[in-house]
Amino acid sequence: MLCVASKAEMERIIARQTDVVLKKAYQEMLDGYLAHPEQGEWYAIWLVTRHDGVQVGDLSFKGLNEDGSVEIGYGIKDEFQGQGYATEAVMTAVDWALNQDGVLCVEAEAEPDNKASQRVLAKCGFVLNGIVGEEGPRYVRMHNLTI
């Protein structure tokens, strides 16, 4: 299940985060959320929870671009990896995004050695687009794809 974190929840997540890179990324999401309140869902942290309410990970979009693209990032806590949570969460979020007005494609990056993330993207209909980004090869899922 996915739910959008409130501003207060995002602030708590940032305060508890000990990983410097993740803390910076979460702060950037919150800054975007505050700067674009009318598009908050495109910057918010989305909580990935099991049916019993346990949070297993999170994901986010990195804003809605003028060209109709959005980028997604996601992570599942170590103890919950390999159980299908990432695939289910990414598929749900991408399907939601592609049904929003103005969204033509969803993009993602996966580090070259992160085979698990690459498999998640493939299962969710993403294909390599030939560009290498900050975190590795970029993948794209177009609006008109049917899986």
Image (tube, rainbow, N blue to C red):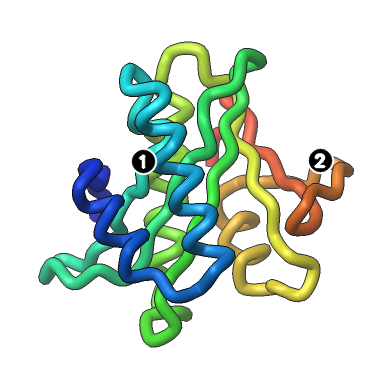
Judged from the image, the secondary structure of the residue bearing numbered disc 1 is loop
- Residue topped by disc 2: 129
Q: Amino acid at mark 1?
A: Ala
* Label 1–label 2 contact, CB within 8 A: no
Answer few, some or many: residues within 10 Å of disc 1's Cα (few below 14, many 20 plus, some between 14 and 19): many
Judged from the image, the secondary structure of the residue bearing numbered disc 2 is strand
- Residue topped by disc 1: 44
Labels in figure, total = 2
**Cα–Cα span, label 1 and label 2:** 26 Å
| Residue 39: image location, x then y, percent | 37, 22
Q: Is residue 20 visible?
A: yes
User: Eyeballing the image, is 7 above or below 16?
Assistant: above
Along the viewing direction, whichever of 96 and 10 lies nearer the viewer? 10
Which part of the image, by quadrant, shows the N terminus? bottom left
Q: Is residue 114 left or right of residue 84?
A: right
Residue drawn at x 32%, y 70% is 16
Judged from this view, the residue extending furthest toward the bottom is: 79
Residue drawn at x 38%, y 33% is 33
Which part of the image, by quadrant, shows the C terminus? top right
| Residue 137: image location, x then y, percent | 80, 54
Residue drawn at x 48%, y 65% is 75
| Residue 9: image location, x then y, percent | 22, 52
Along the viewing direction, whichever of 24 and 124 lies nearer the viewer? 24
Sequence order check, earlier mark of 1 and 2: 1
| Residue 84: image location, x then y, percent | 41, 70
Residue drawn at x 45%, y 33% is 32
Q: Is residue 144 visible?
A: no
- The circle on residue 12 is none
Judged from this view, the residue extending furthest toward the left is: 52
User: Eyeballing the image, is 143 above or below 6?
Assistant: above
Q: Is residue 112 left or right of residue 69?
A: right
